Amino acid sequence: MSIPKTQKAAIFETNGGKIEYKDIPVPTPKPTEILINVKYSGVCHTDLHAWKGDWPLDTKLPLVGGHEGAGIVVAKGDQVTNFEIGDYAGIKWLNGSCMSCEFCQQGAEPNCPDADLSGYTHDGSFQQYATADAVQAAKIPKGTDLAEVAPILCAGVTVYKALKTAALTPGQFVAISGAGGGLGSLAVQYAKAMGLRVVGIDGGEDKEKLFKSLGGEIFIDFTKTKDVVTAIQEATNGGPHGVINVSVSPAAISQSCKYVRTLGTVVLVGLPAGAVCESSVFEHVIKSIQIKGSYVGNRQDTAEAIDFFSRGLVKSPIKIVGLSELDSVYKLMEEGKIVGRYVLDTSK
Ligand code: NAD
Ligand code: ZN
């Protein structure tokens, strides 16, 4: 396979600065890395946070964002034994970790203090050729639709793990706050596949339509509902047993601690800049609720999330545009106008 010296990429020099679509060198894989010819990459709200510099963790600069990249292995370092040239592989948020700290040792690799993050500390999938640590790179079955599997690599894995973290049982209610976005539209389907009754919270008719088409049961439009807390509690006869927060709204996150059912679990996933989750100590104790953070997933969660997709239990509601259009995707995302997930075709 011939590998070019240069390639197209979407790159920025400063946080919030111009995103340039231009030629940059193709990276060389380290001995432990594979080089993936990225065909498609999902655009996650995390990429927007990274570009804006929203979080108290510096990005590398200049930076090529992206961490939902699906493609084909075109080269590998001489220590790589688990991938062959021609295999399908995925770039995840967790590009690599130390594999020897207390957290890696127990399979909590995303929590590694030395985690290397695609599209954050390591150039990501908004380029035609990207490197990934072979231990962490996702295995994608040959013949998989690479555009459709792309969002599974972050959004899918993350919501799958968040649902496991909520530890619900079939027949219970789960509320997905932000149900019409990238993570939310996949969360609805994983939840349904796990036998849960799904309540979706988001804004607008297009998101409601998508939610219903994915098997969601009760939709609450936060732009039209005066008292969201009461509406959800009434619709679920006392509140959902679990809540997966994938909105980028601090108010919506705090609200979920109010409407969650007694003994229920609130899972925090969405990461609005500078947000604090408020929960009344009195209600927290009397209702004995739990609030848990959930951060992407490990290798096993990734394999399981991809398996749900491969078996047709989860479909990606995607819209494909060119890599050169990344800045307009960010604009739509900022305005909350994205229904499902946008995926970039790296050839355009
Ligand atoms: P997205 O923009 O596609 O979706 C967010 C959705 O929230 C939109 O549909 C929006 O309309 C909806 N929303 C806005 N205000 C709301 C409100 N008040 N109530 C209910 N819904 C509301 O974003 P995404 O790509 O799905 O990412 C969501 C968040 O999850 C981001 O903050 C991202 O950084 C974070 N994230 C976290 C992890 C993790 O491991 N914890 C992984 C991936 C993404
Ligand atoms: Zn992501």
Image: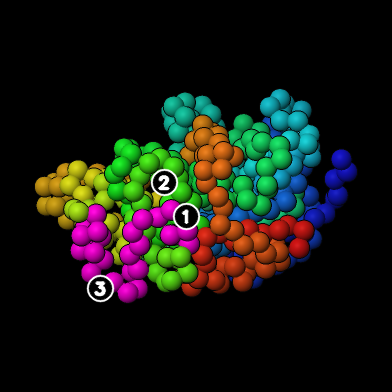
Q: Check the picture and name the quadrant holding the C terminus.
A: bottom right
Dot 3 or dot 1: first in sequence order is 1
- Front one among 177 and 8: 177
Question: Which residue position holds label 2?
Answer: 192
SS of the residue under disc 2: helix
Q: Amino acid at mark 2?
A: Lys
The residue closer to the viewer here, 166 or 317, is: 317
Looking at the image, residue 325 lies above or below residue 25: below
For residue 255, say whether it is visible: yes
Give the magenta-colored segment's residue range: 210-236
Whether residue 279 is visible here, answered yes or no, is no
Instruction: Determine the CA span between mark 3 and mark 1.
Output: 26 Å
The magenta stretch spans residue 179 = no
Viewer-nearest of labels 3 and 2?
2
Residue under label 3: 226
The 10 Å Cα crowd at callout 2, few under 14, some 14 to 19, many 20 or more, is many
Q: Residues within 10 Å of mark 3 (few under 14, many from 20)?
A: few
- Relative image position of residue 197 (x, y in whole percent): 34, 48
User: Answer yes or no: do the residues labelled 1 and 2 have beta carbons within 8 Å?
Assistant: yes
Report the disc number at residue 13: none
